[in-house]
Image (cartoon, rainbow, N blue to C red):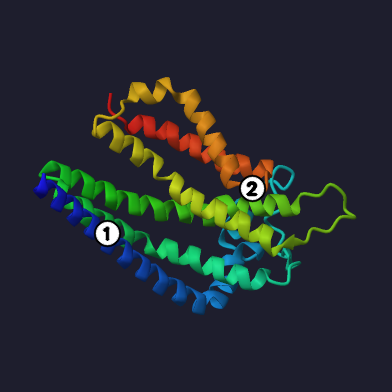
């Protein structure tokens, strides 16, 4: 019992120092991102509001009909981002620095998680978990890239060009822009972890492909509720843009699960 208690205390100490290291690295990255944020904002965050964004140029070259989708060939398209709150720019500067730091932290976070659980694994378990961690890191960044390069700019361009009346001028607030930007980019990064999660659960013997198929409807309801929770604006287009990729990735995860 005494040996078990000491082992438990040792794990707590390891976990404590792991959290300290992760917190220190996160703080350092947040400070770095805070210093670089004006450049990142102009070159990266606000890029989808410009007609020169790569997705818009590519779609304009493919000849997508403007009657179905936005007129991506309109080179004069530009969206004005306005601020209506005294403190919004400062708070956005701080919050965006934190989120960018969190993305940069992800590989190190995975490394610390792997180092923490590795002593409890042996043989094939170490190999499987290591591959899962490496694959999870790659899928997270792929998801963020898909959200930034395709999902968010397409939705943003569609909604900003939609007109109920030509007398109405769209002026997008900074808070609205950042809420949609962060949501779609980072949720897509997390969403691509779903196939890996289902594969890991089935490999560990906690669930099977039959299990995921049987509870498909319940999973759709849970994913919809999660979508509503992470989209406080209640915008149906944003809800749909978040829910559909999540559910499609759940269906893809079923393919990777074991029987």
Give the vertical position of 202 relative to 71 (above or below). above
Identify the mark at residue 99; answer none if there is no mark: none
In which quadrant of the rendered image does the N terminus lie?
top left
Q: Position of residue 39 (x, y in %)?
A: 55, 77
Q: Position of residue 10 (x, y in %)?
A: 18, 56
Task: Answer left or right for 28 relative to 13.
Answer: right
Q: Nearer the viewer, residue 220 or 164?
A: 220
In which quadrant of the rendered image does the C terminus lie?
top left
The residue pinned by badge 2 equals 232
**Residue 61 appears anywhere in the view:** no
**Residue 142 appears anywhere in the view:** yes
Q: Marks 1 and 2, how far apart in space?
A: 32 Å
Q: Nearer the viewer, residue 126 or 61?
A: 126
Give the vertical position of 247 relative to 41 (above or below). above
Labels 1 and 2: the sequence-earlier one: 1
Task: Answer left or right for 103 relative to 111.
Answer: right
Counting other residues with Cα less than 10 Å from the Cα at mark 2, is it few (<14), some (14-19), or many (20 or more)? few
Check disc 1 and report its element: helix, strand or loop: helix
The residue pinned by badge 1 equals 112
Residue at x 29% of width, y 38% of height: 200
Q: Position of residue 213 (x, y in %)?
A: 40, 23
Check disc 2 and report its element: helix, strand or loop: loop
Residue at x 61% of width, y 68% of height: 92
Give the vertical position of 149 relative to 20 (above or below). above
């Amino acid at each position: 019992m005494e040996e078990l208690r000491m082992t438990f205390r040792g794990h707590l100490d390891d976990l404590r120092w792991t959290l300290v290291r992760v917190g220190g690295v996160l703080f350092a990255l947040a400070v770095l991102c805070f210093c670089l944020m004006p450049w990142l904002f102009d070159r990266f965050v606000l890029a989808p509001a410009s007609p020169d964004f790569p997705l818009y140029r590519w779609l304009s070259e493919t000849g997508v009909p403007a009657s179905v989708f936005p007129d991506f060939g309109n080179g004069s398209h530009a969206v004005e981002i306005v601020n209506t709150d005294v403190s919004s720019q400062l708070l956005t500067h701080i919050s965006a620095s934190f989120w960018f730091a969190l993305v940069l932290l992800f590989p190190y976070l995975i490394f610390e998680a792997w180092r923490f659980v590795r002593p409890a694994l042996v043989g094939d378990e170490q190999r499987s978990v290591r591959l899962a961690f490496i694959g999870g890191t790659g899928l997270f960044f792929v998801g963020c890239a898909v959200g930034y390069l395709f999902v968010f700019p397409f939705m943003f361009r569609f909604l900003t060009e939609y007109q109920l009346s030509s007398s109405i001028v769209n002026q997008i607030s900074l808070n609205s822009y950042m809420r949609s930007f962060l949501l779609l980019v980072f949720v897509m990064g997390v969403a691509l972890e779903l196939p890996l999660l289902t594969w890991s659960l089935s490999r560990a013997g906690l669930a099977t492909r039959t299990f995921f198929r049987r509870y498909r409807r319940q999973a759709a309801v849970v994913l919809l509720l999660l979508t509503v929770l992470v989209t406080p604006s209640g915008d149906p287009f944003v809800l749909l843009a978040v829910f559909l990729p999540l559910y499609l990735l759940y269906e893809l995860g079923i393919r990777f699960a074991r029987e």
